[in-house]
Image: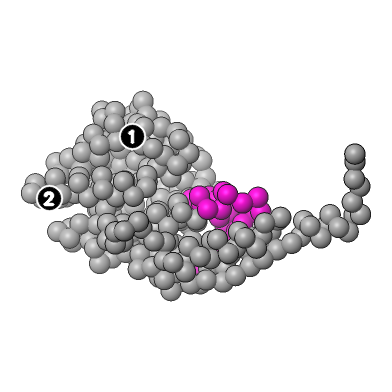
Amino acid sequence: MKFADFMCNESLNANLQAKTKEDTIREMVKSLLDAGQIAEEDYDGIVRHVLKREELGSTGIGRCVAVPHTKFSNVKKMVGTVAISQEGVDFDSLDGQPVRVLFMLISPPDQPQDHLLALEHIAKQLREDTFRRFMVQAKKREDIVELLSEADANNFAV
Amino acid sequence: MLIILPCEFIVKQNTQKSMETVVVTNENGLHIRPVAMISQCAAKFQSKIELEANGQTVDARSIISILLLAATKGTSVKIIAEGPDHQEAVNAIAELFRDGFPLDGSADTLV
């Protein structure tokens, strides 16, 4: 699984405005809506599902990274987006640190293996700190596009 | 008072090790929520705890490392603990697998 298989480049956001967890999730789902990846009538449902998932335990996995996600029945193919917060968002992360880099995944309910492989790909990039450090420094959408494609080409592996 | 233990006793204490192989039974495999549960459980013990699956061995305290296993339903995972509370550590983590990483009262449909 590569970022190119599920990331929607048009929705990548290098300058997240939200300051809270809920607003962050809204802003990220909105970017998928604006990019035509999800239907307008699904927007509220997806936001609600992602928030509900966070109630079960934060997806802030440490190292300033969070992976908010959900399954949603109207989604036919897994879609993802990235947001970078310049100031950091309190995401109740497991290590207590504010989150700077967010990967959002919205998946169809019947493809748990794709979700797992996407998580594995994200984790693989985060294993070496270079990718995360560059992501945090991204200032515009094109920077994220380039970093994701370099990650897909294994350029951050040691 | 300083008690000097014989050398072989110390070595024996340090090399105490337990392992158990379990199978991932929950539908969604080791995604973030189960992985967070494993990591939080592992942090309670003093022993070094590792998970081995799909040809890789990773630190059971590191969420990012466990996600790298990409362990789907049906994958065999070997839990290896080494240290003073090795047996308790293996038992506690094996129990999470056996219980299928239970949620409090709701089904595993959101995650």
Amino acid tagged 1: Ile
For disc 1, the chain is A
Q: Is residue B61 above or below residue B108?
A: above
Q: Is B110 situated above or below A130?
A: below
For the N terminus of chain A, the image quarter is bottom left
Q: Quadrant of residue A24?
A: top left
Mark 2 or mark 1, whichever is nearer to me: 2
Q: Earlier in the sequence, mark 2 or mark 1?
A: 2
Residue B83 badge: none
Q: Is residue B60 magenta?
A: yes
Question: Which image quadrant is residue B25 in?
Answer: bottom left
Would residue B58 appear left or right of A78 to someone viewing this image? Answer: right
Q: Residue at x 45, y 33 (%)?
A: A97
- Viewed as shown, does residue B30 lie left or right of A78? right
Question: Horizontal and vertical percent for residue B67?
Answer: 46, 56
Q: Residue furthest left?
A: A41
Residue closer to the observer: B68 or B100: B100
Q: Dot 2 corresponds to which residue?
A: A42
The range drawn in magenta is: B39-63
Q: Which residue is mark 1?
A: A84
Q: Chain of mark 2?
A: A
Q: Image point 52% across, 53% down: which residue?
A: B41
